[in-house]
Image (cartoon, grey):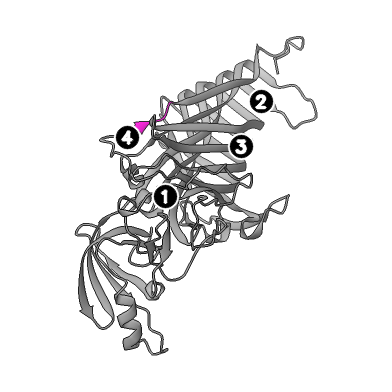
Amino acid sequence: MTLVTPAADRAPSATTSPVAPSAVPSAVVPSAVPSPVAPSAATVASGAPTAATPAPSGTPTVAAGAADLKLTSYDRQTGKAVLAVVADDGKGVPSPSATAATTAAVQTGRLIDSPPSAAAPQGALLAITAVKPAGAGKVQVDTRPATIAELLGQTWANIKAALDPHKIHVTPRVKDLKVSYVPKPDGGSGSASATLRLDANDTVPLPGGSEAALTGSLELDPSVVFSYQGTHGILAPEQAKVGFDLGAHADWHLTAGLAGSTGPVRIPVATLTATPTVMVGALPVVITLNLTVYAEVSADGTVGVDVAQTVDGTWAIHADYTKAAGWHSATDPISTTVTPVRATFTGSADVRSALVAEGSVALYDALGVKATVRPYLRAQVQGTATVALDSGGVKPGIDGSVGLYGGLDVDGAVLARIAVLGTPLFEKDVPFKLYHQEWPIVAGSYRSPTPSATPTT
């Protein structure tokens, strides 16, 4: 837990100067302002909360005794919280000297900066407005939500942290979901040297009484992104960014019978949650990533679908703030490949199948950005078509007409509670500009037996 005086109360430093971003993506680069706290790499932090007070330069220092405090309860509606002194005698009872020194660090105007705990699963960033001793080594405090700008002040940081897949909590949404970890080809670095793999095999009901069967594997490689550049004497940053990068590889097989206009039918696979705590100097900043993965199929018409396909892609989703322009969102589709390894369609319909990732990023419990990434395969079919792109050059077999298209849709919004950064609170979500791209894979139209007719590939 961290106790920090708000940035508005700090004396601005005349020696502060901007620092160029680090070339190492996972590094945290502090401000050039001298600080008694040594800079730290972007790592996942754990343990007791930290307390800090501002140095004359405007950067915080750790308050004596504060590392022996923990947040034991917090009510978001009332703002009331209880801090307790960590026992140091092995019997669960703190010594009188430890209690006096630690509780003395709890003062009105300081900030509570706590990593995730049972009392605050997404961490807590709070400003203390009143202090009341509660006995037995505890202190009751009244609080209000604090901002990242109050916590970091004039600090400068640029963080991209790959998530350790072993610390991603997976909630299965299909029966018998298997979770495993696949080493990265390049070895990666440290705890993030593997990707998370999900293997699914399930059948779900569809509108009209039919069923869809989904089998296959999905590998995910998520990272969280946070950057911040403080300014002198104000509670809004010069620049800030919050978002996530997502790399994915999927091999999956979907069979379904669709009739009429179904609209998108979702087949949930899993929900993933991670709460990494990255270090900016000695101060923890808590980032929460929630990600739901599902397959999606829709049709306008009657068609039988049997598709085995591969999806590969890397996408960067983030919300960016500058003092001059305010908030805006950005989508960087670094790469997207949608390949129908084998696809058979029978009927007459416009049908689309997709593997979808729907995610959000939070700083503490204040949402910053949400987005849906939807790589898809679309088919316009009349008759029967079989496409096998892994069959050694065998041409597609078509009795009728078919058009196959790969595509990518990304949409989302910068969310109202982004005020955790100290910028004005939005009255409503600010939507992304929809990113949409589609490209042809196979197109053809002829009827058997006309061997001279050759579909376009």
Q: Closer to the N terminus: mark 1 or mark 2? A: 1
Q: Mark 4 points at which residue?
A: 429
- How far across and how far down the image is residue 226, in percent? 48, 46
In this rendering, which labeled residue sits more in front, label 1 or label 2?
A: 1
Range shown magenta: 429-433
Q: How far apart are marks 1 and 4 (CA)?
A: 36 Å
Q: Nearer the viewer, residue 170 or 430?
A: 430
Quadrant for the C terminus, please: top right
In this rendering, which labeled residue sits more in front, label 2 or label 3?
A: 3
Q: Closer to the N terminus: mark 4 or mark 3? A: 3
Residue beneath the point at 63% across and 35% down: 309
One can see residue 94 in this view: no
Q: Distance between the residues labelled 4 and 2?
A: 44 Å
In this rendering, which labeled residue sits more in front, label 3 or label 1?
A: 1
| Mark 4 element type | loop
Q: Which of 262 and 352 is in front in this view?
A: 352
| Looking at the image, residue 419 lies above or below residue 325 | below
Q: Distance between the residues labelled 3 and 1?
A: 44 Å
Q: Name the residue under label 3.
A: 313
Q: Name the residue under label 1.
A: 13
| Looking at the image, residue 272 lies above or below residue 208 | below
Q: How far apart are marks 2 and 3 (CA)?
A: 25 Å
Residue beneath the point at 73% across and 50% down: 186
Which residue extends farthest right?
Answer: 392
